[in-house]
Amino acid sequence: MSAKKGLAELGEFGLIEHIQAQAGSAPFLKLGIGDDCSILTVASDEELLTSTDLLIEGVHFDLNWTGFEQLGHKSIAVNISDIAAMGGLPKCLYLAVAVPPTLSVDSLEQFIGGVLAETKRHGAILAGGDTSRSSGPLVISVTVQGTVKKGQAVCRNGAKDSELIFVSGTLGDSALALTQFKQGMSPAPELERKHHCPQARSELGSRLAGRKLASSMIDISDGLIADLGHILAASTAGAVLNLEAIPLSPSFRAACHMQPEIIDLALTGGEDYELLFTVAPDSEPEIDRLATELNLPLTCIGSVEKSGELRIVRKDGSNYQNQQGGFEHFAEH
Amino acid sequence: MSAKKGLAELGEFGLIEHIQAQAGSAPFLKLGIGDDCSILTVASDEELLTSTDLLIEGVHFDLNWTGFEQLGHKSIAVNISDIAAMGGLPKCLYLAVAVPPTLSVDSLEQFIGGVLAETKRHGAILAGGDTSRSSGPLVISVTVQGTVKKGQAVCRNGAKDSELIFVSGTLGDSALALTQFKQGMSPAPELERKHHCPQARSELGSRLAGRKLASSMIDISDGLIADLGHILAASTAGAVLNLEAIPLSPSFRAACHMQPEIIDLALTGGEDYELLFTVAPDSEPEIDRLATELNLPLTCIGSVEKSGELRIVRKDGSNYQNQQGGFEHFAEH
């Protein structure tokens, strides 16, 4: 596929063949790209997990500060993050794109490059998709299929009174980077990386499920408070969060030092793609060992309560009230 | 969900809950809408088929002549048609929609109504999805998972020399309806129904696969010539089609009588969602019996040849040359 070739000239089938040639193969995938459907075998001791995401230019991403390879990477990572949140490992990805006529083949190749690299990094396969032109923005739809051992999937509804609430990595970095991009600033590399190249925590999710450590789990896409809210609603429980326990990166801390209200980005900013999960209190040492194994911070940020409320408390015992709720995809930003 | 409520007010989670309440349940679906992923069990004697489609307002549909309930119906039907084309039966559907802020909740409810009705008509379940606002056109992404008995899926690459080429139903009706809509005309009900409410031929596909009758199969979405071309390319074969054998509806025949060049819509128009399949010559009586069982015309329109060409011949033996190739999704129409 030549970079000089226009998309209309290259055509749908040329694009599909280009992707197909790079997609690779896997033992579980009997048939990949190129027929009406993929054919997948699921082992008899496994269950199939499926999630789908739609990403729209101008809503979910902005090409003013997002490179095409990053966009490809992120489109796959955020989708795989949903598999991680159930404790599964990703197997097959399906990519559908609607491309504005103005988009260059070169940009599209970079995007596909990011998609394939991130897919392969997780040992998964691009197994199908759809392509067309778009009458408006660039549209990306990704569907992921993963597997988990039968009965080991971790849902949102298992949180119980007195359990500890843990979160992986650090929070707020992605939202702070986005805020700075919108203000025309260049975020610190640490922040930018979290925004453009989030890491789906599938290894963590899979081990938490395999060792039966997590009673409930979700990935933080809409923001800590909104996503913890989903767990609490599904589990009919409340929680108390310790504001100062929320894990923050050095760059985020530095920004917070100048503007303390930035802490709300760690609570409600979203797009962290870290795992939020609940564990029995006596499992804390095992969680600490897992953090060492994976070289990934796993931080206890609070505990589940019987009451239906979600309270955020400061070290001095006072309640903290954040300024906004979680991310709502229909709201204008 | 009140029709007076705006989408932004209703919010993403309100919309998801509204859909979830109507989605139903099925034994194979352990967990449906409402968590990070669905959980599906696949029987040990079955393989999983998956296909995904992206539908963009202004490219794949036009709201000037398409009702929202029809759009919901069609979005699901065209996706299930891909499962039918492999000989499978649909199980789980995933719907992602990006909604322009101007779209009324009432319209969205009609759309969801069409989606759910068509999904249930096939004994399938809406098992997950995604919702957001759109910065441009209405965007619909549908992914379908179906199953087929192990080893029975019918691919595109099995067509063999001297086999007969069959097609279900009639061709060209949908494309003729679209042409008439674009000209400001009202198509005959028979044509309009084929355009707005195509019937995925999953019962036919499933029986052809189960009885091992079809050696290759595809659904006609891009047009007879383009889709037969996919079978021939995958099977490294050629074919001869008999122009006068192509099955046409009474309304299409009437239009053809006035404008003979309309026949090209049956060859290249696309969106027929009929099944095109190849069978061994001695299977013809079984195909005829199947047509009677299903009360669905199954017409022999030609045969497979060794050569790599696709020829269309008239009754008098002369070659017919159609005016255009199949549908290319990147071309401007």
Image (tube, coloured by chain):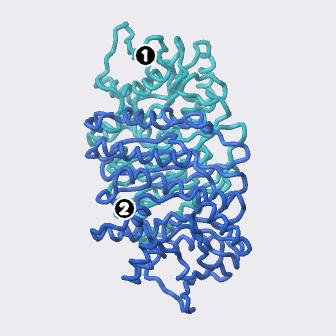
Chain colours: A blue, B cyan
Q: Amino acid at mark 1?
A: Leu
Q: Residues within 10 Å of mark 2 (few under 14, many from 20)?
A: some
Packing grade of label 1 (10 A; few <14, some 14-19, many >=20) is many
Residue B203 visible here: no
Q: Residue at x 46, y 44 (%)?
A: A116
Amino acid type indicated by mark 2: Val
The residue located at (51%, 51%) in the rendering is B115
User: Mark 2 sits on what residue?
Assistant: A59
- Residue drawn at x 44%, y 58% is A197
Q: Describe the element under mark 2 as helix, strand or loop.
A: loop
Same chain under badges 2 and 1? The reply is no
Which image quadrant for residue A177?
A: bottom left
Residue A75, percent from left and from top: 44, 53
| Residue B139 appears in view | yes
Chain holding disc 2: A
Residue at mark 1? B241
